[in-house]
Image (cartoon, rainbow, N blue to C red):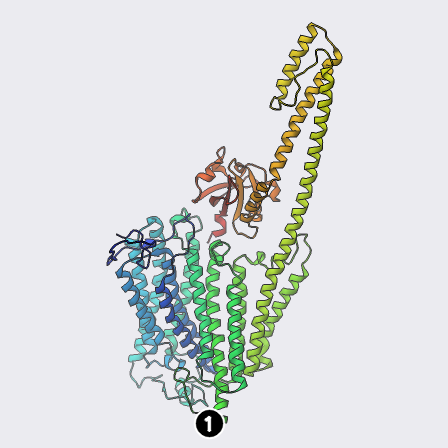
Amino acid sequence: DMEGLDEDGHFAGDGDHGEVSLPFYAPPVQRQRWGEDQVLPHVNWGDLFFDLFYVGMAYNLGVMLTSAVDDLTFLRGFIYFVACFGTLWTSWENIMFYESRYTTVDYFHRMFEVVRFMFVSLAIVHVGSIENMSDGKSSETMVFCIAALGEGLMYLGQRVELLLRGQGDRDAITNHTKRMIKYTIPTLLLYTAALAVSIWLYTRPEDEPHGRLLADPVDDKSSNYNSDYNSDYGSSAWRIDDLPLTLMAVAWIQNIVCTYFLELRATNGKHGDVRTQLVPSNIDYVIHRYGEWCLLMIGEGILSLVIVETAETADYYIITTFGTLTMIFIQILKFESEPSHAEGHALWKDIRNGKFYSYLVQILSMSLIVFGVMYKVFLKKVLKSYKAETSYAAHRFLAGGGSYMSDETSAALFCGGLTALLLSLELMNLTHSGVMKSDLLGRITKESGDVDWTMVTVMILKICIVIFTVTLQYWTTDPDAMTLCGCAIVFAMASTRVFVHYYLHKRSVLLQLTDNLTSTAKKAAETLRTENLTSTAKRAAETLSSSAKTVPGAVLSLSLSEPKRSVGENDAKLNSTEKKDSESKPSGKSSQQGALASSLASLVKRASDQADSSQDLYSPAAHKQKEAIQRVVDDHSFDAIIASNKAGTILNVNKQAVKDFGYKSGSDLVGKKVTILFQHIDGSPEKLTENEGKQLVETFTMENGTSMKCIIASKSIAGAQDCVVTYVRSLETIQGL
């Protein structure tokens, strides 16, 4: 009995469910369906545990980086760093996206993950120094390639299983899985080629050129690449021994390019409904996992600060204290300024923006590794001086090792890593709203069209901070000064982000208050005019009615106690009364007064109805309804958003809707029927609510009469009774090639 079990094999609710055992094998089940609400799944403790492997990856990559210490080895170190990071990142992201789309609850898949992470751990263990990995006679690169290929083949097998046994929307699963297999095969071919080359290098005879590079212990006073090593290597910055990891780096780049273009082609509308081409991810889960990954990379910087031998000097405590503060500020800068849920996040709004966000996470991760490991280099320099002064002989095992790095090299890597880190964080912030809609670029002008010099000043300040970061290495190479400046730079960027948030929020509140005051004043004036009209009409009607009562044969039935009588009924009664009066004692004056009284009674009725409708419009309930509608109509959304009532009247639209449908302003749409946009609901606007929670592909009519295909999804507006919001996205915005 599998009903009620979560992905950890536990019951979702409480109570006594008796003895339940997991099956040995159960097919993977689609987690997220099109049109369903995005709900963050239960925390999977296995995810958190296996993430710890990647902490070791970051640590070992830092060790690799510190071994590339001169111009001859820097290019080689860059290639190796990118190859190892890209390979392990690809394995992590493949697992993450699989779990965001499917869930498995059985023993087979648990054992499958154990074996898979044995390959991952094997690859991480063999991420070592440049000296060892570039030695064709060393097993480091060969075993790394074996582990990467083994993990890749397991991923391919997982895809084949989905193709044959996956449960859910079979059309989407089949098409999506075939496409994933298509771009996985080139990556695996490159892995295979890298392994073949590494095996050839490992098994070649010793007397061939480019023989084994000696791996003698390294003296702290010299470079990792000593004279013997450089003699074997020659003066070339790249040679055949570097080919395996070069192929691995190419595989990472190829994977990025293929996934980008193939997914865009799948959503360009030429292959049918996008819902049959892609299996949707649980975006909240993806956001959560990306955040956990970034924390792991920040953790590498913390490890570099704490897993180092201590020294009783002021320099040591300056670096550890302000280095720790810097990593805390980076965490704040990353997580406190971006959406934490699907709504408003780049991964939810647009395929291109979601892809760019993923690429920026990778750049941010590599930057954090480079930046964080420099603290270890700084501390080792301090420790080296301390040992020389005090003859300190203690040695911590985990913190030992490493190589000498010049002040200029460490300063360049520190500044380069910090610059890339800041730029990636700023660009990640832009992906959530778009370059022209971002807080900094899209709001440097006020609503009136004037330049907002406060925002311009903030933008200039950020540019100056980045320039200062890039050039800091030319002003000083002192570890203490670099650490203090780095902390000040990150703190300044975090402060500008906080200032922009509160400044824009304050400006938005002031604009909203101004709009509310203006609207309230207009409503009050209209209400007063209506009430004055009603009061005057009532007094006039009462006066004329009392006068008419004194005239024989006058109309006596013009009492305001019958407001429901229509003008036509009053006219008919007036004619009947006049006819009867004319048969007895006709009076021209009384007939005129009766007709006037009847007309005034009709006027009173219309004025009273208008006053009542005005009171309903300006009531607290109506105000709450307006606020609820305003909350869902987001002017910063990439989707066109239309709020309407169930009668089909448009109540509000966002700026994107005005732009997409070719209108000049929202006022051109508000008050009109949705039938001017939605072809499929012509004469039947209630169909919007009938399809609530579903995503549909429909045809829309633009202002110029042309049509376009769009994806729409509708739902009721919480707090606004009988109102519905419709999200519209043109297929052109997700069109690929």
Q: Is residue 192 above or below residue 671?
A: below
Is 655 situated left or right of 607 in this image? left
Q: Residue furthest top?
A: 583
Residue 456: x %, y % from top left: 65, 62
Q: In this view, does 343 lie above or below 688?
A: below
Type of residue at label 1? Ser
Is 279 situated left or right of 598 in this image? left
Indicate the quadrant where residue 471 lies. bottom right
Residue 254: x %, y % from top left: 41, 64
Tally the numbered discs. 1
Q: Which residue lies furthest to the right in this view?
A: 589
Q: Name the residue under label 1.
A: 391
Residue 665: x %, y % from top left: 62, 44
Q: Is residue 69 visible?
A: yes
Q: What element carries label 1?
A: loop
What residue is at 40 percent from the left and 87 percent from the top?
229
Q: In this view, does 652 lie above or below 113?
A: above
Residue 135: x %, y % from top left: 36, 81
Indicate the quadrant where residue 479 lies. bottom right
- Mark 1 Cα shell of 10 Å, populated few (<14), some (14-19), many (≥20): few
What residue is at 57 percent from the left and 71 percent from the top?
491
Between 522 and 135, the one nearer to me in the picture: 522
Q: Is residue 192 visible?
A: no
Between 318 and 730, the one nearer to me in the picture: 318
What residue is at 52 percent from the left and 58 percent from the top?
432
